[in-house]
Amino acid sequence: MALHCGVFSFRSVASHPPSSVMLSQPTVKASTFSSPLAPPIVKFNVRGKAFPGDGTPETKESPLVVCFGEMLIDFVPTVSGLSLAEAPAFKKAPGGAPANVAVGISRLGGSSAFIGKVGEDEFGYMLVDILKENNVNHEGMRFDPGARTALAFVTLRSDGEREFMFYRNPSADMLLQEDELDLDLIRKAKIFHYGSISLITEPCKSAHIAAAKAAKDAGVVLSYDPNLRLPLWPSEDSAREGILSIWETADIIKVSEEEISFLTKGEDPYDDAVVRNLFHENLKLLLVTEGAEGCRYYTKEFSGRVKGLKVDAVDTTGAGDAFVAGILSQLAVNLSLIQKEEELRDSLKFANVCGALTVTERGAIPALPTKKAVLDAMLKPVS
Protein backbone atom coordinates (compact mmCIF):
# COMPACT_ATOMS: atom_id res chain seq x y z
CA MET A 1 0.00 0.00 0.00
CA ALA A 2 1.31 3.45 -0.78
CA LEU A 3 1.32 6.22 1.82
CA HIS A 4 0.52 9.60 0.31
CA CYS A 5 0.57 12.89 2.18
CA GLY A 6 0.94 16.15 0.34
CA VAL A 7 4.52 16.36 -0.87
CA PHE A 8 5.66 12.76 -0.41
CA SER A 9 4.83 9.18 -1.34
CA PHE A 10 6.27 5.83 -0.14
CA ARG A 11 5.72 2.15 -0.81
CA SER A 12 5.66 -0.68 1.72
CA VAL A 13 8.79 -2.61 2.70
CA ALA A 14 8.01 -5.89 1.00
CA SER A 15 11.17 -5.66 -1.06
CA HIS A 16 13.34 -5.96 2.06
CA PRO A 17 14.14 -9.27 3.79
CA PRO A 18 12.15 -9.87 6.99
CA SER A 19 14.65 -11.07 9.55
CA SER A 20 18.13 -9.57 9.46
CA VAL A 21 19.20 -7.15 12.19
CA MET A 22 22.78 -6.40 11.12
CA LEU A 23 23.70 -3.57 8.79
CA SER A 24 25.76 -5.72 6.45
CA GLN A 25 22.58 -6.58 4.55
CA PRO A 26 23.13 -6.46 0.79
CA THR A 27 19.69 -4.89 0.39
CA VAL A 28 20.88 -1.60 1.83
CA LYS A 29 21.69 0.53 -1.17
CA ALA A 30 25.06 2.17 -0.67
CA SER A 31 28.60 1.09 -0.13
CA THR A 32 29.76 0.39 3.40
CA PHE A 33 32.71 2.18 4.91
CA SER A 34 36.09 0.52 5.23
CA SER A 35 36.87 2.81 8.18
CA PRO A 36 34.84 4.84 10.71
CA LEU A 37 37.06 7.83 10.15
CA ALA A 38 36.30 10.83 7.97
CA PRO A 39 38.87 12.61 5.77
CA PRO A 40 41.98 14.01 7.49
CA ILE A 41 41.76 17.15 9.59
CA VAL A 42 42.53 20.33 7.79
CA LYS A 43 42.74 23.93 9.03
CA PHE A 44 41.44 27.27 7.87
CA ASN A 45 42.21 30.69 9.32
CA VAL A 46 39.26 32.94 10.08
CA ARG A 47 40.13 36.34 11.45
CA GLY A 48 43.39 34.87 12.63
CA LYS A 49 41.73 31.92 14.38
CA ALA A 50 42.22 28.30 13.33
CA PHE A 51 39.20 26.02 13.14
CA PRO A 52 39.79 22.28 12.62
CA GLY A 53 38.29 20.99 9.40
CA ASP A 54 39.34 23.26 6.52
CA GLY A 55 42.50 24.19 4.64
CA THR A 56 45.62 22.11 4.23
CA PRO A 57 45.59 18.38 4.99
CA GLU A 58 47.35 16.98 8.02
CA THR A 59 48.60 13.45 8.51
CA LYS A 60 46.60 13.00 11.71
CA GLU A 61 43.18 11.39 11.42
CA SER A 62 40.16 13.17 12.83
CA PRO A 63 39.21 11.98 16.35
CA LEU A 64 35.95 10.03 16.42
CA VAL A 65 32.73 11.23 18.10
CA VAL A 66 30.27 8.38 18.68
CA CYS A 67 26.62 9.38 19.15
CA PHE A 68 24.13 7.03 20.83
CA GLY A 69 20.33 7.06 20.87
CA GLU A 70 17.33 7.61 18.64
CA MET A 71 17.05 8.22 14.92
CA LEU A 72 13.60 8.83 13.48
CA ILE A 73 11.53 10.57 10.83
CA ASP A 74 10.23 14.07 11.54
CA PHE A 75 7.15 15.13 9.58
CA VAL A 76 7.28 18.91 9.35
CA PRO A 77 4.28 20.95 8.12
CA THR A 78 4.86 22.77 4.85
CA VAL A 79 3.04 25.80 6.32
CA SER A 80 4.02 27.29 9.68
CA GLY A 81 1.59 28.53 12.28
CA LEU A 82 -1.04 25.79 11.84
CA SER A 83 -2.01 22.87 14.04
CA LEU A 84 -1.22 19.35 12.87
CA ALA A 85 -4.84 18.86 11.89
CA GLU A 86 -4.86 22.08 9.85
CA ALA A 87 -1.55 21.47 8.04
CA PRO A 88 -2.18 20.85 4.31
CA ALA A 89 0.92 18.67 3.87
CA PHE A 90 4.09 17.51 5.60
CA LYS A 91 7.69 17.28 4.50
CA LYS A 92 9.55 14.23 5.78
CA ALA A 93 12.93 14.91 7.35
CA PRO A 94 15.35 12.52 9.05
CA GLY A 95 15.96 13.45 12.68
CA GLY A 96 16.55 12.33 16.25
CA ALA A 97 18.86 14.45 18.40
CA PRO A 98 21.91 12.14 18.67
CA ALA A 99 21.71 11.31 14.94
CA ASN A 100 21.48 15.02 14.14
CA VAL A 101 24.70 15.59 16.09
CA ALA A 102 26.48 12.75 14.27
CA VAL A 103 25.52 14.12 10.85
CA GLY A 104 26.30 17.67 11.97
CA ILE A 105 29.84 16.72 12.97
CA SER A 106 30.44 14.98 9.66
CA ARG A 107 29.08 17.97 7.69
CA LEU A 108 31.59 20.12 9.56
CA GLY A 109 34.48 17.94 8.43
CA GLY A 110 34.76 15.81 11.56
CA SER A 111 34.56 12.07 12.10
CA SER A 112 31.40 10.60 13.64
CA ALA A 113 29.54 7.36 14.20
CA PHE A 114 25.96 6.63 15.24
CA ILE A 115 24.76 3.73 17.38
CA GLY A 116 21.04 2.99 17.51
CA LYS A 117 18.19 0.90 16.18
CA VAL A 118 15.59 1.44 13.47
CA GLY A 119 12.76 -0.69 12.14
CA GLU A 120 13.34 -3.09 9.29
CA ASP A 121 11.06 -0.95 7.15
CA GLU A 122 11.32 1.59 4.37
CA PHE A 123 11.99 4.46 6.76
CA GLY A 124 14.64 2.51 8.63
CA TYR A 125 16.56 1.74 5.45
CA MET A 126 16.18 5.34 4.36
CA LEU A 127 17.71 6.59 7.63
CA VAL A 128 20.72 4.31 7.29
CA ASP A 129 21.20 5.57 3.75
CA ILE A 130 21.14 9.14 5.15
CA LEU A 131 24.02 8.23 7.49
CA LYS A 132 25.96 6.75 4.59
CA GLU A 133 25.37 9.76 2.36
CA ASN A 134 26.73 11.99 5.12
CA ASN A 135 29.81 9.85 5.80
CA VAL A 136 28.66 8.83 9.29
CA ASN A 137 29.96 5.45 10.43
CA HIS A 138 26.94 3.13 10.72
CA GLU A 139 28.58 -0.07 12.00
CA GLY A 140 26.65 0.27 15.28
CA MET A 141 23.22 0.49 13.63
CA ARG A 142 20.76 -2.39 14.08
CA PHE A 143 17.43 -3.26 12.47
CA ASP A 144 14.42 -4.60 14.38
CA PRO A 145 12.15 -6.92 12.34
CA GLY A 146 9.23 -6.55 14.75
CA ALA A 147 9.02 -2.82 15.46
CA ARG A 148 8.64 0.23 13.26
CA THR A 149 10.97 3.18 12.90
CA ALA A 150 9.86 6.03 15.16
CA LEU A 151 7.89 8.93 13.68
CA ALA A 152 7.39 12.44 15.05
CA PHE A 153 4.95 15.01 13.72
CA VAL A 154 6.23 18.49 14.47
CA THR A 155 3.96 21.51 14.75
CA LEU A 156 5.68 24.73 13.69
CA ARG A 157 4.32 27.85 15.33
CA SER A 158 4.50 31.11 13.42
CA ASP A 159 7.74 31.98 15.26
CA GLY A 160 9.39 28.71 14.16
CA GLU A 161 9.17 27.05 17.60
CA ARG A 162 7.90 23.48 17.77
CA GLU A 163 5.53 21.09 19.45
CA PHE A 164 5.85 17.32 18.99
CA MET A 165 3.51 14.35 18.58
CA PHE A 166 5.36 11.01 18.65
CA TYR A 167 4.51 7.55 17.28
CA ARG A 168 6.53 5.08 19.39
CA ASN A 169 4.47 2.19 20.80
CA PRO A 170 7.13 0.86 20.96
CA SER A 171 9.41 1.99 18.16
CA ALA A 172 12.61 0.21 17.20
CA ASP A 173 14.95 2.70 18.92
CA MET A 174 13.42 1.74 22.29
CA LEU A 175 14.34 -1.92 21.75
CA LEU A 176 18.12 -1.74 21.36
CA GLN A 177 19.63 -4.37 23.65
CA GLU A 178 22.92 -4.40 25.52
CA ASP A 179 24.20 -7.43 23.60
CA GLU A 180 23.69 -5.52 20.32
CA LEU A 181 26.16 -2.77 21.25
CA ASP A 182 29.33 -2.32 19.22
CA LEU A 183 31.61 -1.84 22.23
CA ASP A 184 34.77 -1.74 20.11
CA LEU A 185 33.39 1.26 18.22
CA ILE A 186 32.52 3.00 21.49
CA ARG A 187 36.01 2.43 22.91
CA LYS A 188 37.60 3.97 19.79
CA ALA A 189 35.85 7.30 20.40
CA LYS A 190 37.39 10.51 21.71
CA ILE A 191 33.89 11.67 22.75
CA PHE A 192 30.73 9.62 23.42
CA HIS A 193 27.57 11.72 23.10
CA TYR A 194 24.02 10.84 24.19
CA GLY A 195 20.67 12.22 25.34
CA SER A 196 18.02 11.14 27.85
CA ILE A 197 15.30 9.70 25.60
CA SER A 198 17.15 6.38 25.51
CA LEU A 199 16.72 6.17 29.32
CA ILE A 200 12.92 6.10 29.26
CA THR A 201 12.25 2.39 28.69
CA GLU A 202 13.95 -0.98 28.78
CA PRO A 203 15.83 -2.59 27.13
CA CYS A 204 17.32 0.59 25.68
CA LYS A 205 17.92 2.06 29.13
CA SER A 206 20.25 -0.80 30.09
CA ALA A 207 21.98 -0.57 26.72
CA HIS A 208 22.53 3.16 27.25
CA ILE A 209 24.02 2.67 30.74
CA ALA A 210 26.28 -0.15 29.52
CA ALA A 211 27.47 1.90 26.54
CA ALA A 212 28.31 4.91 28.72
CA LYS A 213 30.15 2.70 31.22
CA ALA A 214 32.22 1.09 28.44
CA ALA A 215 33.12 4.57 27.17
CA LYS A 216 34.01 5.88 30.64
CA ASP A 217 36.13 2.81 31.43
CA ALA A 218 38.02 3.34 28.16
CA GLY A 219 38.82 6.97 29.03
CA VAL A 220 36.36 8.42 26.51
CA VAL A 221 34.92 11.89 27.25
CA LEU A 222 31.16 11.73 27.94
CA SER A 223 28.92 14.42 26.43
CA TYR A 224 25.28 14.75 27.54
CA ASP A 225 22.40 16.78 26.10
CA PRO A 226 19.21 15.84 28.02
CA ASN A 227 17.01 17.00 25.13
CA LEU A 228 13.86 17.07 27.25
CA ARG A 229 10.75 15.70 25.50
CA LEU A 230 8.13 15.57 28.24
CA PRO A 231 5.42 13.79 26.19
CA LEU A 232 7.66 10.71 25.99
CA TRP A 233 8.07 10.35 29.78
CA PRO A 234 5.40 8.87 32.07
CA SER A 235 5.41 12.03 34.22
CA GLU A 236 7.35 15.21 34.96
CA ASP A 237 8.85 13.64 38.07
CA SER A 238 10.06 10.57 36.18
CA ALA A 239 11.60 12.81 33.51
CA ARG A 240 13.43 14.89 36.10
CA GLU A 241 14.62 11.82 37.97
CA GLY A 242 15.69 10.03 34.78
CA ILE A 243 17.61 12.99 33.39
CA LEU A 244 19.42 13.62 36.68
CA SER A 245 20.16 9.91 37.25
CA ILE A 246 23.16 10.07 34.90
CA TRP A 247 24.02 13.74 35.41
CA GLU A 248 27.17 13.20 37.45
CA THR A 249 28.81 10.78 35.02
CA ALA A 250 29.06 13.35 32.20
CA ASP A 251 32.18 15.40 31.45
CA ILE A 252 30.36 17.88 29.19
CA ILE A 253 26.69 18.87 29.54
CA LYS A 254 24.61 21.09 27.29
CA VAL A 255 21.21 22.28 28.53
CA SER A 256 18.71 24.88 27.41
CA GLU A 257 17.35 27.62 29.66
CA GLU A 258 13.95 25.84 29.65
CA GLU A 259 15.59 22.60 30.80
CA ILE A 260 17.27 24.39 33.71
CA SER A 261 13.89 25.71 34.84
CA PHE A 262 12.44 22.22 34.57
CA LEU A 263 15.28 20.45 36.40
CA THR A 264 15.34 23.02 39.22
CA LYS A 265 11.53 23.09 39.56
CA GLY A 266 11.10 26.65 38.37
CA GLU A 267 14.26 28.43 39.49
CA ASP A 268 15.66 31.27 37.41
CA PRO A 269 17.81 29.85 34.56
CA TYR A 270 19.58 33.22 34.20
CA ASP A 271 20.83 33.16 37.80
CA ASP A 272 24.45 31.99 37.79
CA ALA A 273 24.04 30.56 41.29
CA VAL A 274 21.21 28.33 40.04
CA VAL A 275 23.31 27.12 37.13
CA ARG A 276 26.35 26.56 39.35
CA ASN A 277 24.24 24.26 41.53
CA LEU A 278 24.00 21.96 38.48
CA PHE A 279 27.79 21.90 38.13
CA HIS A 280 29.06 18.61 39.65
CA GLU A 281 32.56 17.79 40.84
CA ASN A 282 33.67 15.84 37.74
CA LEU A 283 32.12 18.16 35.16
CA LYS A 284 34.54 19.88 32.79
CA LEU A 285 32.14 22.10 30.84
CA LEU A 286 28.50 23.14 31.28
CA LEU A 287 26.86 24.94 28.36
CA VAL A 288 23.51 26.74 28.52
CA THR A 289 21.89 27.60 25.19
CA GLU A 290 19.63 30.63 24.92
CA GLY A 291 18.32 30.32 21.36
CA ALA A 292 18.98 33.40 19.25
CA GLU A 293 20.71 35.12 22.17
CA GLY A 294 23.64 32.67 22.07
CA CYS A 295 24.98 30.63 24.98
CA ARG A 296 26.63 30.72 28.39
CA TYR A 297 29.57 28.58 29.44
CA TYR A 298 30.76 27.41 32.85
CA THR A 299 33.98 25.63 33.82
CA LYS A 300 35.61 25.27 37.23
CA GLU A 301 37.85 28.27 36.47
CA PHE A 302 35.69 30.71 34.48
CA SER A 303 32.29 31.47 32.96
CA GLY A 304 30.80 33.87 30.44
CA ARG A 305 28.36 34.47 27.59
CA VAL A 306 28.83 34.35 23.81
CA LYS A 307 26.32 36.19 21.62
CA GLY A 308 24.42 34.38 18.89
CA LEU A 309 23.96 35.21 15.22
CA LYS A 310 20.56 36.80 14.51
CA VAL A 311 18.68 35.19 11.61
CA ASP A 312 15.06 34.83 10.46
CA ALA A 313 13.88 31.54 12.00
CA VAL A 314 11.87 29.20 9.79
CA ASP A 315 12.12 26.01 11.87
CA THR A 316 14.11 25.65 15.11
CA THR A 317 14.20 21.84 14.89
CA GLY A 318 17.79 20.68 15.25
CA ALA A 319 19.27 24.05 16.25
CA GLY A 320 20.51 22.75 19.60
CA ASP A 321 21.91 19.64 17.94
CA ALA A 322 23.75 21.75 15.38
CA PHE A 323 25.23 23.77 18.26
CA VAL A 324 26.36 20.56 19.95
CA ALA A 325 27.86 19.28 16.69
CA GLY A 326 29.71 22.57 16.33
CA ILE A 327 31.33 22.53 19.76
CA LEU A 328 32.04 18.77 19.82
CA SER A 329 33.71 19.00 16.41
CA GLN A 330 36.12 21.50 18.00
CA LEU A 331 36.62 19.69 21.31
CA ALA A 332 37.29 16.34 19.63
CA VAL A 333 40.34 17.86 17.97
CA ASN A 334 41.46 19.94 20.95
CA LEU A 335 39.97 19.10 24.34
CA SER A 336 42.29 21.63 26.01
CA LEU A 337 39.94 24.36 24.71
CA ILE A 338 38.09 23.87 28.00
CA GLN A 339 41.07 25.33 29.88
CA LYS A 340 41.61 28.27 27.46
CA GLU A 341 38.79 30.76 27.70
CA GLU A 342 39.51 32.81 24.57
CA GLU A 343 39.84 29.70 22.40
CA LEU A 344 36.69 28.24 23.96
CA ARG A 345 34.81 31.46 23.18
CA ASP A 346 35.93 31.28 19.54
CA SER A 347 34.68 27.69 19.32
CA LEU A 348 31.37 28.67 20.90
CA LYS A 349 30.95 31.48 18.36
CA PHE A 350 31.40 28.82 15.70
CA ALA A 351 28.83 26.56 17.43
CA ASN A 352 26.34 29.45 17.74
CA VAL A 353 26.54 30.05 14.00
CA CYS A 354 25.96 26.33 13.37
CA GLY A 355 22.73 26.57 15.35
CA ALA A 356 21.65 29.82 13.72
CA LEU A 357 22.06 28.58 10.16
CA THR A 358 20.06 25.44 10.96
CA VAL A 359 16.90 27.40 11.82
CA THR A 360 16.81 29.03 8.37
CA GLU A 361 15.54 25.80 6.73
CA ARG A 362 12.87 23.21 7.54
CA GLY A 363 13.83 19.92 9.18
CA ALA A 364 16.86 18.99 11.25
CA ILE A 365 19.34 16.95 9.21
CA PRO A 366 18.52 18.65 5.88
CA ALA A 367 19.28 22.04 7.47
CA LEU A 368 22.60 21.19 9.19
CA PRO A 369 25.32 23.45 7.77
CA THR A 370 28.63 22.62 6.14
CA LYS A 371 31.91 23.98 7.47
CA LYS A 372 32.13 26.38 4.53
CA ALA A 373 28.66 27.80 5.20
CA VAL A 374 29.55 28.42 8.85
CA LEU A 375 32.87 30.08 8.07
CA ASP A 376 31.27 32.24 5.38
CA ALA A 377 28.60 33.40 7.87
CA MET A 378 31.28 34.21 10.44
CA LEU A 379 33.10 36.39 7.92
CA LYS A 380 30.02 38.43 7.03
CA PRO A 381 29.81 41.85 8.73
CA VAL A 382 27.19 42.07 11.45
CA SER A 383 24.39 44.47 10.50
Image (spheres, rainbow, N blue to C red):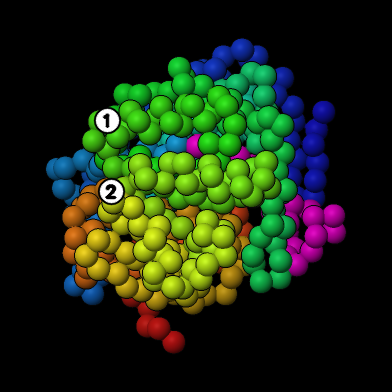
Which residue bears the numbered disc 1?
217
Where disc 2 sits, the SS reads loop
Q: Earlier in the sequence, mark 1 or mark 2?
A: 1
Residue 255 horizontal side relative to residue 362, left or right: left
Question: Does the rendering let one see residue 42?
Answer: no
Residue sitting nearer the eye, 250 or 365: 250
Residue 365 rendering spot, x and y as whole percentages: 53, 50
Q: The residue under label 2 is which amino acid type?
A: Asn
Residue drawn 46% across the image and 32% down it: 208
Q: On screen, 305 above or below 225?
A: below
Where disc 1 sits, the SS reads helix
Q: Is residue 70 magenta?
A: yes
Q: On screen, 103 above or below 374?
A: above
The residue segment tinted magenta is 69-92
Residue drawn 39% across the image and 69% down it: 273
For the residues labelled 1 and 2, say whether their Cβ atoms are less than 8 Å apart. no
Q: The residue under label 1 is which amino acid type?
A: Asp
How many numbered marks have been drawn onto this rendered protein structure? Answer: 2
Q: Nearer the viewer, mark 1 or mark 2?
A: 2
Residue 78 horizontal side relative to residue 209, left or right: right
Q: Is residue 345 magenta?
A: no
Residue 32 horizontal side relative to residue 80, left or right: left
Residue 63 rendering spot, x and y as whole percentages: 25, 42
Picture quadrant of residue 294 = bottom left
User: In the rendering, which numbered label is found on residue 259?
Assistant: none
Q: Residue furthest right?
A: 86
Picture quadrant of residue 216 = top left
Residue drawn 60% across the image and 21% down it: 144
Q: Main secondary structure of the magenta part?
A: loop
**The N terminus lies in quadrant:** top right
User: In the rendering, which numbered label is found on residue 282?
Assistant: 2
Q: Residues within 10 Å of mark 2 (few under 14, many from 20)?
A: few
